[in-house]
Image (cartoon, rainbow, N blue to C red):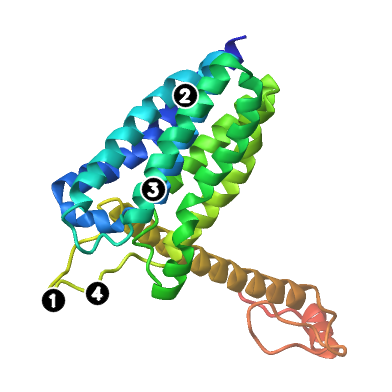
Amino acid sequence: MAADFILDTVAICFAVFFMTAPLSQAIDVCGTPAKVRYVNPINLLCFYLNCMTQLAYGLFLPVPPVVPCNAYGVGVAIFSTSACWWFARKEQHAINWDRTAAIGTLLAVLLSATIFAFAALESAADVGVLGMLVGIIMYGAPLSSMKEVLKTKSSETLPVMQSFLGFLNSSCWFTVGVRTGKVPVWGPNVIGMMLSLLQLALILKYPAKTGGPEQQDFIPVLAEHSLADIARVVSADLAERLADGSESISDFMKRSSQDLSSFFSPNRGNEYISLDGEEPMSPDKKKLIEECPPDFA
């Protein structure tokens, strides 16, 4: 159907954008190697493992729309992880890229190879079930630094592009999974949407900060955080405008209700209320004017 083709195409496009998110970090690190301190290896390793799992599932079940974007994602993950490891070797402040991260990298490679072989030789459907769990882990991986974010009140270690594009990507693939009836496709993306929204909320609440250029070891944060700064300013300005607008509407409604209540209120005693602001006339005076109208000729 045409609708399915369009939806698959849109989902693939958003997935390609999402798969490009780690690449933006890697390019930033290549330009300023010291920025590798802001890249969380858990994000990249979970990203790589998810792409390999989904690629195996898409190839051997098969689910064609899943293949192109995840093949691209595998390439991005390998390049990004390799680049970060290359520059982290000589960066003393890259404390996240330690022996534990090296062991995790080796395990991720071995596990992905095992999953790929199992999907090809045994059951791709079982790999799809595993892919749901891996996908959820990938979307929640940036929250591994949430404790640090809450402690420092800084979102410098949260990936802005990955969180934003992850929300759009999971939304599209949730729709594809529902239409095709593939639980491994729509299942993890429901949770992925919520986890991405939580990350975006933390990024908007806590601006990335490094302490100031006066520090000796000052390193600017990743360039993608400038987008978060723009979104933060725009959202604050929009909220202020909405607050001013709602206050104006409230004042207008209040004045209107007062005018209407005054217009329809009963006469005070037996006096007639003048509409032009003059003194009210008593019934006797009004009767006298009616009987003997003044002559203006």
| Residue at image location 16% in from the left, 55% down from the top | 90
- Asked where in the image residue 221 lies, by quadrant, the reply is bottom left
Q: Nearer the viewer, mark 3 or mark 1?
A: 3
Residue tagged 3: 103
180 over 101 or under it: above or below: above
**Which SS class for mark 3?**
helix
- From the top left corner, tell me how far across and down residue 63 is, in percent: 57, 16
- From the top left corner, tell me how far across and down residue 189 is, in percent: 60, 38
- From the top left corner, tell me how far across and down residue 97 is, in percent: 31, 55
Distance of label 2 from label 4 (alpha carbons)? 40 Å
Q: Please say whether residue 7 is visible from this viewpoint.
A: no
Distance of label 4 from label 3 (alpha carbons)? 32 Å
**Which SS class for mark 2?**
helix
Q: Badge 1: few (under 14), some or many (20 or more) residues near its Cα, within 10 Å?
A: few
The disc label shown at residue 104, or none: none
Is disc 2 in contact with disc 4, using a CB cutoff of under 8 Å? no
The disc label shown at residue 211, or none: 4
Residue tagged 2: 12
**Which SS class for mark 1?**
loop
Is disc 3 in contact with disc 1, using a CB cutoff of under 8 Å? no
Distance of label 1 from label 2 (alpha carbons)? 45 Å
Position of 44 with respect to 245 (left or right) is left
The amino acid type found where label 2 is placed reads Ile
The disc, 4 or 3, on the residue closer to the chain's N-terminal end is 3
**Front one among 295 and 129:** 129
